[in-house]
Image (cartoon, rainbow, N blue to C red):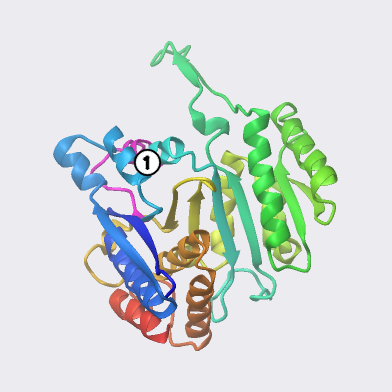
C-alpha cells in the first residue's frame, strides 16, 4: 500500500483579518488533502503585532529554527495599527525571507472570469502572466546609512547591490519556470532600468542574455525598462508571459499587476526557496478595520494555499483549487471581491470552495 504523503506546515495567522482568511485557507487545504490523499499537519505560531505589543518580540532566532523544520509556511497577514510601520515588516517578514533565503517572490497575475478589471476591453484571455521578483538582494539588504541626521546637512544612502550568483540563481529559476509554464509565448521578459542603472542593470541584462543563449534557446528573450513596463501592463498586458526583475522594481510592479487582475483580494504570492522552506500569503494586508466582522475576502489566501501545494509537489490538488475558484467566480455567485460586498461572509466563501472541491 502506497504511503500517504504528509507535510508539516507552520501557520502564522498574524494580524487583523489575517487569521480569518488563513482559517478559510486551511479549511480548503484540508478538503484538498482529503480528496487527493495526503496529510497536512499545521502548527500555529502567534508572531505579529499583538505578540510584539505584549512582549516586545518580533521573530526570535529560535523561531527561525522552529519554522525551518517545516515543509512550508502559510501566512495570513502582518501589520498592526498600533505598531510603527517597519517594525513588524522588517522584524518578521524580511527577517524570515532573508534567514530562510527565500530568494524568489512568485506572483501569478491572473484575471479570473467574473472579476472586474479597470482596464477597458481586457478579459481573462488578456491578463495571465507571472512576475518573478528577486527577493533577497538589491536595495532591501539595507546597505547604506545616515550622517548628520536631523541637521540641515543630513545625508542618507541606501544602495542597490547585486552579485552575479544572486542574479544568476534568480534568472535560472525564471528560465526554468518559463520553460515549464503552459504558454504559447514561452517568453521571459527582463524588467530593469539599464539605461540609467548602468552597473546593476548591465549585470542583469548580461545574465539574462548569456544564460538564455547558452541554456534556454527554446525560450524567447525580451526586455522592458521598468517605467515602460508599467505603461504596457495597462495598455497591452496580453504581451507578457513571465517577467523577471530585481527586488525594488518587482515590489512596485506587482501592486500595479494586482489591480489589473481585480485587486489585492484575489492576489496571492509565494516567497520561495526552491531548495528549502517557502512561505505563501495573500497580498491584501491585514485590513484591521474589518477584523472580526467576517466580511473580508479569503480568495487570495485560498489561492496562496493552492500555490503552496503546487510547490510541495501536490500539483493535482493545486490545479483543483484553482479550477474551483475559477468556476465559482465564473458562475457570478460572488457579487464583488470587496470586503462586505461579496454577498457572502468570509466563512461562507471558504465553505463554498471546500464543498465544491
Q: Is residue 264 above or below residue 168?
A: below
Q: Residue at position x 75%, y 37% from top?
A: 207
Residue 160 sits in which quadrant? top right
Q: Is residue 207 left or right of residue 25?
A: right
**Quadrant location of the C terminus?**
bottom left
- The magenta-colored residue range is 75-93
Number of numbered tags placed on the structure image = 1
Q: Residue at position x 74%, y 51% from top?
A: 189
Residue 355 sits in which quadrant? bottom left
**Quadrant location of the N terminus?**
bottom left
Return the x and y of residue 4 as percentages of the image width and height: 40, 69
Furthest residue toward left: 54
Q: Is residue 33 magenta?
A: no
Q: Residue at position x 33%, y 39% from top?
A: 64
Residue 289 sits in which quadrant? bottom left
Return the x and y of residue 81 as percentages of the image width and height: 27, 47
Pointer 1 residue: 89
Task: Please tell me which residue lies in front, 332 or 327.
Answer: 327
Return the x and y of residue 66 as percentages of the image width and height: 30, 43
Q: Is residue 318 visible?
A: yes
Q: Is residue 216 above or below residue 198?
A: below
Q: Is residue 87 magenta?
A: yes
Q: Is residue 297 visible?
A: no
Tell me the element at label 1. Answer: helix
Q: Residue at position x 50%, y 77% from top?
A: 320
Q: Rate crowding at label 1 as few (under 14), some (14 to 19) or many (20 or more) other CA atoms within 10 Å.
A: some
Q: Is residue 17 above or below residue 95?
A: below
Return the x and y of residue 197 as percentages of the image width and height: 71, 30
Furthest residue toward front: 1
Amino acid at each position: 500500500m502506497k504511503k500517504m504523503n504528509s507535510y508539516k506546515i507552520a501557520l502564522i495567522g498574524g494580524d487583523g483579518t489575517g487569521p480569518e482568511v488563513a482559517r478559510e485557507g486551511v479549511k480548503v487545504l484540508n478538503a484538498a488533502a482529503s480528496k487527493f490523499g495526503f496529510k497536512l499537519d499545521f502548527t500555529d505560531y502567534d508572531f505579529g503585532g499583538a505578540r510584539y505589543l505584549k512582549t516586545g518580540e518580533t521573530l526570535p532566532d529560535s523561531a527561525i529554527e522552529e519554522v525551518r523544520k517545516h515543509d512550508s509556511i502559510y501566512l495570513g497577514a502582518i501589520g498592526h495599527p498600533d505598531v510603527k510601520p517597519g517594525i513588524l515588516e522588517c522584524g518578521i517578514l524580511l527577517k524570515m525571507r532573508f534567514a530562510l533565503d527565500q530568494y524568489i517572490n512568485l506572483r501569478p497575475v491572473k484575471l479570473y472570469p467574473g472579476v472586474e478589471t479597470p482596464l477597458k476591453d481586457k478579459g481573462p484571455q488578456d491578463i495571465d502572466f507571472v512576475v518573478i521578483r528577486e527577493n533577497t538582494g538589491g536595495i532591501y539588504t539595507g546597505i547604506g546609512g545616515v550622517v548628520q541626521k536631523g541637521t540641515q546637512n543630513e545625508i542618507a544612502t541606501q544602495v542597490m547591490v547585486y552579485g552575479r550568483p544572486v542574479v544568476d540563481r534568480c534568472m535560472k529559476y525564471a528560465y526554468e519556470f518559463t520553460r515549464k509554464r503552459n504558454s504559447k509565448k514561452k517568453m521571459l521578459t527582463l524588467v530593469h532600468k539599464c539605461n540609467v542603472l548602468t552597473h546593476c542593470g548591465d549585470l542583469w541584462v548580461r545574465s539574462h542574455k548569456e544564460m538564455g543563449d547558452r541554456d534556454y534557446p527554446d525560450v524567447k528573450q525580451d526586455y522592458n525598462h521598468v517605467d515602460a513596463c508599467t505603461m504596457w501592463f495597462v495598455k497591452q498586458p496580453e504581451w507578457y508571459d513571465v517577467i523577471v526583475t530585481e527586488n525594488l522594481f518587482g515590489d512596485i510592479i506587482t501592486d500595479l499587476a494586482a489591480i489589473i487582475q481585480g485587486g489585492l483580494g484575489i492576489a496571492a504570492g509565494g516567497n520561495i526557496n526552491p531548495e528549502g522552506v517557502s512561505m505563501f500569503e495573500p497580498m491584501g494586508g491585514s485590513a484591521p478595520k474589518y477584523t472580526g466582522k467576517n466580511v473580508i475576502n479569503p480568495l487570495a489566501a485560498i489561492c496562496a494555499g493552492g500555490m503552496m501545494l503546487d510547490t510541495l509537489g501536490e500539483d493535482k490538488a493545486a490545479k483543483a483549487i484553482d479550477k474551483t475558484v475559477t468556476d465559482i467566480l465564473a458562475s457570478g455567485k460572488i457579487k464583488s471581491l470587496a470586503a462586505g460586498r461579496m454577498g457572502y461572509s468570509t466563512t461562507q466563501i471558504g465553505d463554498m470552495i471546500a464543498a465544491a472541491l
